[in-house]
Image (cartoon, rainbow, N blue to C red):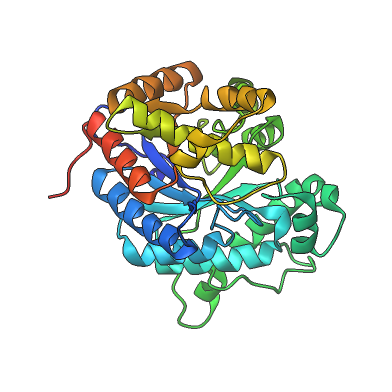
Amino acid sequence: MPADDIRGTTPGTAPVPLSVLDLVTVGAGRTAGDALRTSVDISRLAESRGYHRYWVAEHHSMPGVASSSPAVILAHLAAHTERIRLGSGGVMLPNHAPLVIAEQFGTLEAMAPGRIDLGLGRAPGTDGATAAALRRSDRLNEGADDFPQQLSELTRFLDDDFPDGHPYARIHAVPGPVQATSPGGVQSPHRPPVWLLGSSGFSARLAGMLGLPFAFAHHFSAQNTVPALDLYRETFRPSAVLDAPYALIGVSALATDDEKEARRQVLAAALNMVRLRTGRPGLVPTPEEAEAYEFSAMEREFVDTWNANVIHGTADEVRTGLDELQKRTGADELMLTANAHGGDVRLRSYELIADAYGLPTPA
């Protein structure tokens, strides 16, 4: 597998490659179509400014997050970009049959050769009732516990290498390697690299043991970041995929033209999280709504804790915060997610951060 399928370099003065995690957030007064058009705009900006990859994450039953179908969104983004890597951050494997994921990402690879990443998580990406509806089963723990077996099955479908005698030996994910063995077939030089995602130690350990790249959700599990990365590095075994560990972390980061505006925007995003965590998911509120909202003492404590892990402010302040976080964690890549009510604010944030690091400007 080519090294640039996983490792990359971002020009300028960034200490490690910078990438984008898009939750396709929908603000109050906006539509899912507005959010998806913003995703196209951000992906084009990210490509033109030298960000390394652009991932979307699977979520369900959340009005403010329009990313329930990563493969569909990635196909759309592939049609509007040319070079940037595109992927899932991630697809929640227990929600899907491994064969279906192999087919979807084989199709994406055929659409955008050499540009597709397959990031996999073991959480449902939603609440228990929605997960049961997705899986047509109430045995939710069974899916998470079976994750290593599901991962093995998916990998074999991607590589088309089930052993003789296996019940799936004559089943093939198409598009995929089987087409090269058919008369006149030509082998594609690429196969989507598999990443494991996590917010605790389980996937960190598994990724290390399998020699796979690892993505950690620092943006909502900051207290576990360093222990999980340490565990990943300690358990890492070289593989055909990687000869050394490679870990990226997802980071909430929002840059604005002035510090006051950054505080207004992250307060709105934090109110959205308060509502989500208390069973009231909705559209991302406006900064004006958040400023007028009367937070309880418990809600205010949550907001303060949440926003302490959001790197926000002017571009220079965000750059300083990102540099310090990278140094503290040793992350090989920073994947930035900008959560705000308006798409224009998110777009501007990625532009300001690119400017702060001296990333190339479009010709």
Q: Which residue is at 38% across, 50% downward? A: 343
Q: Which residue is at the front of the view, 202 or 175?
A: 202
Which residue does the image show at 32% across and 40% down from the upper left? 350
**Would residue 66 appear left or right of 167 to someone viewing this image?**
left
Residue 274 showing in the rendered view: yes
Asked if residue 315 lies left or right of residue 193, the reply is: left
In the orientation shown, which residue stands out farthest toward the right? 139
Q: Residue furthest bottom?
A: 183
Above or below, 128 relative to 10:
below
Asked whether residue 231 appears in the rendered view, the answer is: no
Where is residue 181 drawn, in percent x and y?
54, 74
> In terms of image quadrants, where is residue 116?
bottom left
Image: 21 above or below 36: above
> Is residue 48 toward the left or the right of residue 142 in the image?
left
Query: Which of the 4 image quadrants contains residue 316?
Result: top left
- The residue at 39%/46% (across/down) is 53
Q: Where residue 264 sits: x, y (%)?
A: 42, 32
Q: Tell me where residue 311 appears, x and y as whole percent.
A: 43, 26
Can you give x and y, in whole percent of width and height, for residue 30 in the image? 45, 58
